[in-house]
Image (spheres, grey):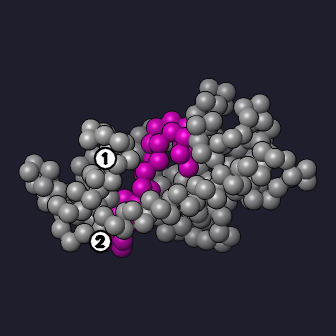
Amino acid sequence: MNEYLSVIHTSPLFSGIEKEETDSMLSCLEAVEKDFKKDAYIFRAGDATDFLGIVLSGRVLITQEDFWGNRNIVSSAAPGQTFAETFACAPGAVMNVSVTAQTPCRILFLNVKKILHTCPSSCSHHNKMIQNLLSSLALKNLHQNEKLTHLAQRTTRAKLLSYLSAAARQHGSFEFDIPYSRQQLADYLSVERSGLSLELGK
Protein backbone atom coordinates (compact mmCIF):
# COMPACT_ATOMS: atom_id res chain seq x y z
CA MET A 1 0.00 0.00 0.00
CA ASN A 2 2.79 2.44 0.91
CA GLU A 3 4.14 2.51 -2.64
CA TYR A 4 0.78 3.84 -3.87
CA LEU A 5 0.21 6.51 -1.19
CA SER A 6 1.30 9.26 -3.58
CA VAL A 7 -1.31 8.08 -6.11
CA ILE A 8 -3.99 7.91 -3.42
CA HIS A 9 -3.28 11.50 -2.45
CA THR A 10 -3.70 12.64 -6.06
CA SER A 11 -7.22 11.22 -5.99
CA PRO A 12 -9.93 13.90 -5.70
CA LEU A 13 -11.50 11.66 -3.05
CA PHE A 14 -8.56 12.36 -0.72
CA SER A 15 -8.25 16.07 -1.56
CA GLY A 16 -7.57 18.15 1.55
CA ILE A 17 -6.90 15.10 3.74
CA GLU A 18 -3.54 15.05 5.52
CA LYS A 19 -1.17 12.20 4.66
CA GLU A 20 -0.80 11.16 8.29
CA GLU A 21 -4.56 10.57 8.47
CA THR A 22 -4.61 8.26 5.45
CA ASP A 23 -3.59 4.99 7.10
CA SER A 24 -6.32 5.16 9.73
CA MET A 25 -8.89 6.18 7.13
CA LEU A 26 -8.02 3.28 4.81
CA SER A 27 -8.47 0.85 7.67
CA CYS A 28 -11.78 2.47 8.63
CA LEU A 29 -13.01 2.25 5.00
CA GLU A 30 -12.17 -1.48 4.69
CA ALA A 31 -9.64 -0.79 1.93
CA VAL A 32 -8.67 -3.77 -0.22
CA GLU A 33 -6.13 -3.84 -3.07
CA LYS A 34 -6.50 -6.18 -6.02
CA ASP A 35 -4.59 -6.73 -9.30
CA PHE A 36 -6.30 -7.33 -12.65
CA LYS A 37 -4.88 -8.55 -15.95
CA LYS A 38 -5.57 -6.71 -19.20
CA ASP A 39 -9.19 -7.16 -20.39
CA ALA A 40 -10.24 -8.73 -17.07
CA TYR A 41 -13.62 -7.76 -15.66
CA ILE A 42 -13.53 -5.68 -12.48
CA PHE A 43 -17.32 -5.34 -12.38
CA ARG A 44 -19.91 -6.82 -14.73
CA ALA A 45 -23.24 -5.35 -15.75
CA GLY A 46 -25.82 -6.82 -13.39
CA ASP A 47 -23.50 -6.67 -10.36
CA ALA A 48 -24.36 -4.75 -7.22
CA THR A 49 -21.58 -3.29 -5.09
CA ASP A 50 -20.96 -1.36 -1.89
CA PHE A 51 -17.41 -0.54 -3.01
CA LEU A 52 -16.02 2.17 -5.24
CA GLY A 53 -12.67 1.70 -6.95
CA ILE A 54 -9.61 3.95 -7.13
CA VAL A 55 -7.14 3.16 -9.91
CA LEU A 56 -3.66 2.83 -8.41
CA SER A 57 -1.92 1.81 -11.64
CA GLY A 58 -3.00 1.13 -15.21
CA ARG A 59 -6.29 2.25 -16.73
CA VAL A 60 -9.88 0.93 -16.75
CA LEU A 61 -12.76 1.28 -19.20
CA ILE A 62 -16.42 1.69 -18.23
CA THR A 63 -18.59 0.23 -21.00
CA GLN A 64 -22.14 -0.71 -21.90
CA GLU A 65 -23.01 -3.60 -24.19
CA ASP A 66 -26.39 -4.42 -25.69
CA PHE A 67 -27.86 -7.89 -26.26
CA TRP A 68 -26.11 -8.16 -29.65
CA GLY A 69 -22.67 -7.25 -28.29
CA ASN A 70 -22.52 -3.66 -29.55
CA ARG A 71 -20.23 -1.74 -27.21
CA ASN A 72 -20.44 1.85 -26.03
CA ILE A 73 -17.56 3.28 -23.98
CA VAL A 74 -19.03 5.44 -21.24
CA SER A 75 -15.71 6.68 -19.82
CA SER A 76 -12.28 5.62 -18.62
CA ALA A 77 -10.30 6.04 -15.39
CA ALA A 78 -6.56 6.54 -14.89
CA PRO A 79 -4.41 6.42 -11.72
CA GLY A 80 -5.99 8.46 -8.92
CA GLN A 81 -9.44 8.42 -10.52
CA THR A 82 -12.49 6.63 -9.14
CA PHE A 83 -15.26 4.49 -10.62
CA ALA A 84 -18.50 2.75 -9.54
CA GLU A 85 -19.23 5.32 -6.81
CA THR A 86 -22.64 6.16 -8.29
CA PHE A 87 -23.82 2.55 -7.96
CA ALA A 88 -22.21 2.07 -4.56
CA CYS A 89 -24.01 5.17 -3.23
CA ALA A 90 -27.43 3.91 -4.36
CA PRO A 91 -28.56 1.05 -2.09
CA GLY A 92 -29.62 -2.00 -4.09
CA ALA A 93 -28.66 -0.44 -7.43
CA VAL A 94 -27.67 -2.92 -10.14
CA MET A 95 -24.89 -1.82 -12.46
CA ASN A 96 -25.85 -1.23 -16.08
CA VAL A 97 -22.19 -0.93 -17.10
CA SER A 98 -19.15 -3.19 -16.97
CA VAL A 99 -15.70 -2.12 -15.81
CA THR A 100 -12.71 -3.82 -17.46
CA ALA A 101 -8.96 -3.42 -17.24
CA GLN A 102 -7.77 -1.55 -20.33
CA THR A 103 -4.21 -2.38 -19.23
CA PRO A 104 -2.88 -4.49 -16.35
CA CYS A 105 -3.93 -2.54 -13.29
CA ARG A 106 -4.13 -2.42 -9.51
CA ILE A 107 -7.35 -1.20 -7.89
CA LEU A 108 -8.03 0.01 -4.36
CA PHE A 109 -11.60 -0.73 -3.24
CA LEU A 110 -13.26 1.37 -0.50
CA ASN A 111 -16.57 0.62 1.22
CA VAL A 112 -18.88 3.56 0.43
CA LYS A 113 -21.14 2.78 3.39
CA LYS A 114 -18.15 3.47 5.64
CA ILE A 115 -17.70 6.84 3.92
CA LEU A 116 -21.34 7.90 4.16
CA HIS A 117 -21.83 6.80 7.76
CA THR A 118 -19.38 8.85 9.77
CA CYS A 119 -17.51 7.47 12.76
CA PRO A 120 -18.77 8.40 16.27
CA SER A 121 -16.19 11.17 16.60
CA SER A 122 -17.34 12.78 13.30
CA CYS A 123 -13.71 13.52 12.49
CA SER A 124 -13.04 16.43 10.15
CA HIS A 125 -11.20 14.32 7.57
CA HIS A 126 -14.18 11.96 7.31
CA ASN A 127 -16.51 14.89 6.68
CA LYS A 128 -14.06 16.19 4.08
CA MET A 129 -14.17 12.85 2.26
CA ILE A 130 -17.97 13.02 2.10
CA GLN A 131 -17.67 16.46 0.49
CA ASN A 132 -15.08 15.10 -1.95
CA LEU A 133 -17.34 12.18 -2.86
CA LEU A 134 -20.21 14.56 -3.60
CA SER A 135 -17.91 16.71 -5.75
CA SER A 136 -16.74 13.62 -7.63
CA LEU A 137 -20.32 12.57 -8.39
CA ALA A 138 -21.17 16.08 -9.59
CA LEU A 139 -18.09 16.22 -11.83
CA LYS A 140 -18.92 12.87 -13.42
CA ASN A 141 -22.44 14.12 -14.09
CA LEU A 142 -20.93 17.12 -15.91
CA HIS A 143 -18.70 14.81 -17.96
CA GLN A 144 -21.70 12.72 -18.99
CA ASN A 145 -23.55 15.89 -20.01
CA GLU A 146 -20.53 16.83 -22.12
CA LYS A 147 -20.57 13.41 -23.76
CA LEU A 148 -24.26 13.87 -24.58
CA THR A 149 -23.26 17.09 -26.35
CA HIS A 150 -20.86 15.10 -28.56
CA LEU A 151 -23.40 12.37 -29.28
CA ALA A 152 -26.10 14.93 -30.14
CA GLN A 153 -24.11 16.03 -33.19
CA ARG A 154 -25.59 14.72 -36.42
CA THR A 155 -22.49 13.50 -38.26
CA THR A 156 -19.35 11.57 -37.42
CA ARG A 157 -17.27 14.63 -38.32
CA ALA A 158 -19.30 16.87 -36.01
CA LYS A 159 -19.08 14.37 -33.14
CA LEU A 160 -15.31 14.09 -33.59
CA LEU A 161 -14.81 17.86 -33.74
CA SER A 162 -16.99 18.33 -30.66
CA TYR A 163 -14.91 15.79 -28.72
CA LEU A 164 -11.55 17.17 -29.88
CA SER A 165 -12.61 20.76 -29.17
CA ALA A 166 -13.60 19.82 -25.62
CA ALA A 167 -10.29 17.95 -25.13
CA ALA A 168 -8.32 20.98 -26.39
CA ARG A 169 -10.15 23.24 -23.93
CA GLN A 170 -9.53 20.78 -21.11
CA HIS A 171 -5.78 20.56 -21.85
CA GLY A 172 -5.40 24.23 -22.74
CA SER A 173 -3.53 23.28 -25.91
CA PHE A 174 -4.05 22.14 -29.49
CA GLU A 175 -1.68 19.23 -28.79
CA PHE A 176 -2.81 16.53 -26.36
CA ASP A 177 -3.12 12.78 -25.87
CA ILE A 178 -6.47 11.04 -25.65
CA PRO A 179 -7.04 7.89 -23.55
CA TYR A 180 -8.58 5.81 -26.35
CA SER A 181 -7.44 3.76 -29.31
CA ARG A 182 -9.15 4.41 -32.64
CA GLN A 183 -11.69 1.62 -32.05
CA GLN A 184 -12.30 2.80 -28.49
CA LEU A 185 -12.86 6.39 -29.67
CA ALA A 186 -15.39 5.09 -32.20
CA ASP A 187 -17.13 3.18 -29.40
CA TYR A 188 -17.08 6.29 -27.18
CA LEU A 189 -18.67 8.46 -29.87
CA SER A 190 -21.04 5.69 -31.06
CA VAL A 191 -19.81 5.78 -34.66
CA GLU A 192 -18.36 3.26 -37.09
CA ARG A 193 -14.59 2.93 -36.98
CA SER A 194 -14.32 3.17 -40.77
CA GLY A 195 -16.20 6.48 -40.78
CA LEU A 196 -14.11 7.78 -37.89
CA SER A 197 -10.86 6.80 -39.67
CA LEU A 198 -12.04 8.58 -42.82
CA GLU A 199 -12.71 11.79 -40.92
CA LEU A 200 -9.42 11.56 -39.03
CA GLY A 201 -7.63 11.18 -42.37
CA LYS A 202 -9.23 14.39 -43.59
Disc 2 versus disc 1: distance between alpha carbons?
Answer: 19 Å
**Mark 1 or mark 2, which is nearer the start of the sequence?**
2
Three-letter code for the amino acid on which mark 1 is drawn: Ala
x, y percent for residue 77: 47, 47
Q: Would you say 9 lies left or right of 146 here?
A: right
Neighbour tally class for label 1: few under 14, some 14-19, many 20 plus, Cα within 10 Å: some
* Residue nearest the observer in this picture, 191 or 9: 9
- For residue 160, what is the image quadrant? bottom left
Q: Is residue 75 magenta?
A: yes
- Percent from the top left, x then y, of residue 197? 14, 52
Q: Which structural element holds mark 2?
A: loop
Q: Are marks 2 and 1 in contact (CB under 8 Å)?
A: no
- In the picture, which quadrant includes the N terminus? top right
Amino acid type for the residue under numbered disc 2: Ala
Q: Is residue 8 visible?
A: yes
Residue 111 visible in the current orientation: no
Position of residue 191 in the picture relative to residue 7 (left or right): left
Look at the numbered disc 1 and give the secondary structure of its residue: helix
Q: Main secondary structure of the magenta part?
A: strand
Q: Looking at the image, is 170 positioned above or below residue 87? A: above
The residue depicted at 35 percent of the width and 42 percent of the height is 172
Classify residue 56 by image quadrant. top right
Question: Residue 43 in magenta?
Answer: no
Residue 104 location, quadrant = top left
Residue 8 is left or right of residue 58, and the answer is right
Which label lies toward us, 2 or 1?
A: 1
Quickly name the residue at label 2. Answer: 152
Magenta region:
54-82
Residue for badge 1? 168
Dot 2 crowding, Cα within 10 Å, few <14, some 14–19, many 20+? few
